[in-house]
Amino acid sequence: MFAVLRWAVLFLPLCLGVRLFHNLYCETGEVEIRRNPEPSKYGSLWPLPQKVQLSAGLFQMSSASFAIVDAKQSSAGSDCNILQDAYRRYYEYVFGRGVQRDTRRGGPPVLTQLQVWISSPDPQCDSYPTISSDESYELFVSLPNVVLKAPQIWGALRGLETFSQLVHEDEYGVKCVNETIVTDFPRFAYRGLLLDTSRHFLPVNDILHTLETMAMNKFNVFHWHIVDDPSFPYMSKTFPELSRKGAFHPYTHVYTYDEVKMVIEFARRRGIRVLPEFDTPGHTMSWGKGQPDLLTPCYSGAEPSGTFGPVNPILNSTYDFMAKLFTEISTVFPDAYIHLGGDEVDFTCWKSNPDIQKFMEKQGFGDDYSKLESYYIQRLLDIVSSLKKGYLIWQEVFDNGVKLKPDTIVHVWIGGGSNNEMGNVTAAGYNAILSAPWYLNIINYGQDWQKHYKVEPLNFNGTEQQKKLVIGGEACMWGEYVDNTNLTPRLWPRASAVAERLWSAQNVTDLDDAFNRLSAHRCRMVGRGIAAQPLFTSYCPKEYWGA
Amino acid sequence: MFAVLRWAVLFLPLCLGVRLFHNLYCETGEVEIRRNPEPSKYGSLWPLPQKVQLSAGLFQMSSASFAIVDAKQSSAGSDCNILQDAYRRYYEYVFGRGVQRDTRRGGPPVLTQLQVWISSPDPQCDSYPTISSDESYELFVSLPNVVLKAPQIWGALRGLETFSQLVHEDEYGVKCVNETIVTDFPRFAYRGLLLDTSRHFLPVNDILHTLETMAMNKFNVFHWHIVDDPSFPYMSKTFPELSRKGAFHPYTHVYTYDEVKMVIEFARRRGIRVLPEFDTPGHTMSWGKGQPDLLTPCYSGAEPSGTFGPVNPILNSTYDFMAKLFTEISTVFPDAYIHLGGDEVDFTCWKSNPDIQKFMEKQGFGDDYSKLESYYIQRLLDIVSSLKKGYLIWQEVFDNGVKLKPDTIVHVWIGGGSNNEMGNVTAAGYNAILSAPWYLNIINYGQDWQKHYKVEPLNFNGTEQQKKLVIGGEACMWGEYVDNTNLTPRLWPRASAVAERLWSAQNVTDLDDAFNRLSAHRCRMVGRGIAAQPLFTSYCPKEYWGA
C-alpha cells in the first residue's frame, strides 16, 4: 500500500491537470520550454566554455583571404597532420565547400589569420588521446590575428570548434566574428558516448558520422559496445570463426581490421579515444556460435537442454581463449583501457549445470554464484592486467566485491538519476563514471534533453576527495530499437545536453539560456549535414536537406 | 484520494517488478515481443489481404523477360498514364534499377507477364480518388500469366503493391513468387495519415517520400495540416501576404501553387486523396501577420494588449476573407472534402474584448462563448457548402452542437484509445473517423506499434447502423518535435500498424504473426530506400544505406 501511494505521488503531478492539446497528451513531467528560441548572450556556443568575454567589436572574414596557420612560436609544424587536417576541416565548417567570396569593401575590419600556437614541447601530434590529455586552450579573437593557444593539440582541436561556433553570418552572408577572449578547459576528463553495434549493425560510415558530431560537442571517448548476445561483428584475426558464425552476416555485417583501424584514426584526429567493450561472462550468446565449449551448457534435469548460458568459468580452455583474444584486442585498440563489461550475469544456467555445481562445492562457494562470477572476473582481470591495460567494468563487478586494480574505473548505470552508488564506488577509492541518468535509448515525448541536462554528477554524499574520483560520465545509446535509420536524430541534440554537463562549469545550469544556445547549436549541426532533431516548434536558416 | 488510487492502479503494473536490464527501464506496459522475427505463413504481406491462398508451387521471374502489361479485356489502355506509371514503379520495386539478369536454366517455371485487367467501363484513369473509389482487386499468380483484376485502377494500384510483396528472392538472388490467389478489399474506405507542415516546415520532397511509403502501406488519404499558429507556408494567390509574412521564410519555407499541384498529382497516381486542412478559428496566429483585422485583438483591462486571439467572428470582413480564401482552396484542391479544423478554441481573448462582449449580448449568447464559436463555424460551413465541398471537422464542433450537413465527417481525437465519442457522433447520424489512439507524435520507449495495432475502431457501444458510419481512421504525426531530420523513422513502421488495422479484416489480430510480417515489411521498406526504424534487435538482408 505504501508502494501504491508512493507511485501515485510520483505519477500524479505528471499526468493530471494537463490541458488537452492536440499535440500533448500526458507529458514527461519535465518543465518544458514552449517558445521560440531567442538569441543568447553567448550566441550559439555549446558546450559553454569556462570563461567567455564577448565584446561588441566586430570583424569580418573572407574565404579568399582567411587562413588557419601554425603560429611561429608553435611547437607543432606542417608535419603535424592531425592539426593540418583540422585546419582544413574547420575552414570548411566556417566557409562551406567551394565558396570563394571577396571581402566587402568597407564594413568591419578584416581578420585574415587564425594562428594556432601549441605551447608545450611535445605537441602530441602522433599520440593518441588519453585520460590525462590536456584539452585546455585560450582563444583571442582580435586584431591583427586570431590566436589560439593550447599546451597540446587536444586543446587546439577544442578551440578550433569553439572558434567555428563564434563565427556567424550577417544578412549579406558575410562571415563575422566578435572580438572575444575564451579561456577554456573541461570540467571532467572523461566525456563518453556509447554505441551498441551488436543489437543492430551500424555501418562504419555511421560511426564516423557520429565521431564527427561528437567532436562538435567536445565528447572525447567513444565507448564501442562492439559485441553482445545478438551478434559478434568484430572480425578477430585470432578467432575468425567468432564473426563468421556470430555476426548477423559474415561479410556485410562485420568490422574488418582495417575498418576498426580507420575508426580509431578518425577518432584520434578529433581527440576522441576509442574504448572497446568485450563484455563477459554474460551477454555472450553470439560468442558461443564460433567458439565451441566457451559457453556453459544449461541442463534440464539431468540432461543438457541444448541451450547455453554465460561463459563457462570452470574450464581452463576458457581462460586460454580469453588470454589470446584479449592479447589481440590490446594490440588492435591502442587505448590504455578496455571495458570488460561484467554486467547482468544470469545464474540460472550455471545453477542447472552439474559440473558447475561440483566446482562450486570444491571451491567452497556454497550457493553464492556471485562468488563464481567473481572468480571468473578475477582471472580475466589478471589476464588483462598482464597485458598492461587498465580496465573499466560495469558496477556489478564492484558490487560483488571483486578485487580491482587501484586505477580501475567503475561504470555506474543502475537506477537512473544521480545516486548513492557513486558514493559507494568513490568511498572505496575507485574512479567512477556516471551513465545511470543518461540512457539516451530511453525515449520520451517532449524535451527530455532538459532532464539529462539537469543532472549533477557530483550530487551524492561524499568527501571532496571522493568527488575528485568522479572522472566523468557517458551517454549510452543501446541498440535494441536503434539502427542507422534512426540513430542520428535520436542521438542529437539529446546527447549534446550531456556534453555540456560534462564540459562546462558546474554553475552552468540556466535552462532558458541552454534552450537558446542548444537551438542554435542544433541548427549549426543541421547546417553541417547532421540530422539532429528539433527541440520544439522552430525552423533553421539552413534546414536539413539530406546528408 | 479516489483519483490517487485509480492512477496508481493504472501505473503500477507498468513500472514495478520490471527486472533491471541495461536496455530496459520502465516499459510502456505493453506486452513486448522480444525475439527474432520468424517467417510468417503469409510471408511479408502488409497489410494482410482479406483472403490469401498461398500454394507450394513456385515460379521464377527474370528482369529480362518479365513485363507488366494491360490485359486484352482491360478497359484501360496505353493512354492510362496512372497505370503505365505504376507498371514502371512496381517493376523497379521488384527488380531494382538497371538489373538485367537472364533466367536460370532449369529451376521453377518462368512467369513472364503480369496482366492488369480493369473490368469496369470507366477505369478512372484521369479521375481523383474519392471516398467511394473501389479499391478491391483479385490477384491470380499462376501459369501462364499473373492476372490482376480490378474494377477500377485504384484496386489495380493496391494489387500491384500486393504482387510486389509476394515476390521474394532465392539464395541466388532470383526473384520468385508462389502460386497464389488473393481476393482483397479494404475494411475501411478512409485510411488517413496527417502531416503537420506548420510547426516545422517539411520540404516537398519529404512529403512525396511519405506519399510513396503510404502507398506501400495502402493508406489512401493524406491529411495535410498545412497551416497553424507557428507558420503559414501555403502560398495563396488571392492573399499572397499570408505566406509572405506568416511563413517561417517567404521563399525557402513555403509551398508554391506548382508544388501543391505536384503533391496532389503524385498522390493521385498512388490512389491517395489530398485533404487540406485550414484550421479556424483557433490555431491561426500565423494568419494574422498577413491579414490585418482577421484576428481578435485581446484586451488588458480597457486597452488592447497588443496580442491577438482566434479569428474575429463579429466582423463581416472576416467572412469576406474566408469566402475568398476558401474559394481558392476549393479550386486548388480537387478533393470533395476540406478539413475545417475547429479544435481547441481558447475563449480568453474573446472574453477580454469589449466589442465581442457587446456582440454576445446583442446575439443573446449570454456567457456561453461556445455559442460564439458555433456562430462563426456555422457561417464558415455555409460558405464552404456553397462551394460544393464537403467538410471534416474536429470533434469539438460536433460537441458544441453546430448544425452540420448530413455528409459531414467528424474527426474524433480526444481521450486516446477507442472511446464513447465514436458512439455519440454516430448516434447523431454522422460519419466518423478515429484518430484518438493514433497520435504517432507521442513516442514511447519500446514497441508501441503493438498498442496502435490492438485498437479496434468499432469497439464502442452502438448499433450496427452506427458502426457503418465509421468510415475509417487516421494516424496523426503532429510536428512540434518532428521535421525532416526525424520524420521518416518516427513514422514508419509505426504508422504501418494503423494501416493494417484499417485495411485488413477485423479478426486479423495475431500479434506474433503481425510482428513477423511487419519485421519483413519494414525490411522491404528499408530496401526501397525508406528509413523505417527497427521493431527490435534484428538485421535486414538489405540495410539502409541512405535515401
Image: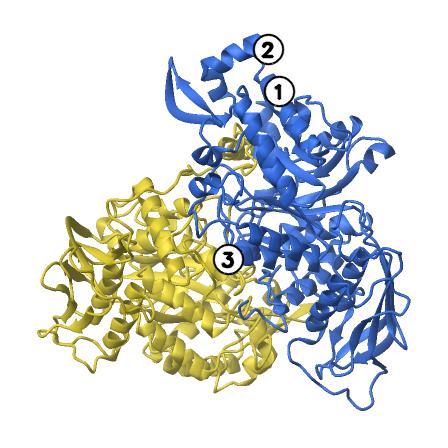
Chain colours: A yellow, B blue
The one of B134 and B490 positioned closer to us in this rendering: B134
From the image, tell me which residue sits under label 1: B375
Please rate how many residues cluster around mark 3, counting C-alpha atoms within 10 Å: few if below 14, some from 14 to 19, many from 20: some
Q: Amino acid at mark 1?
A: Tyr
Mark 3–mark 1 Cα distance, whole angstroms, equals 56 Å
From the image, tell me which residue sits under label 3: B22
Q: Amino acid at mark 2?
A: Gln
Quick one: label 3 or label 2, which is nearer the N terminus? 3
Which is in the foreground here, disc 3 or disc 2? 2
Secondary structure under the numbered disc 1 in the rendered image = helix
Give coordinates of residue A78: x percent, y percent.
19, 81
Give coordinates of residue A521: x percent, y percent.
34, 53
Please rate how many residues cluster around mark 1, counting C-alpha atoms within 10 Å: few if below 14, some from 14 to 19, many from 20: some
Mark 3–mark 2 Cα distance, whole angstroms, equals 63 Å
Secondary structure under the numbered disc 3 in the rendered image = loop
Which is in the foreground here, disc 3 or disc 1? 1
Q: Amino acid at mark 3?
A: His
Instruction: Give the residue at x 67% y 24%.
Output: B399
The one of B30 and A378 positioned closer to us in this rendering: B30
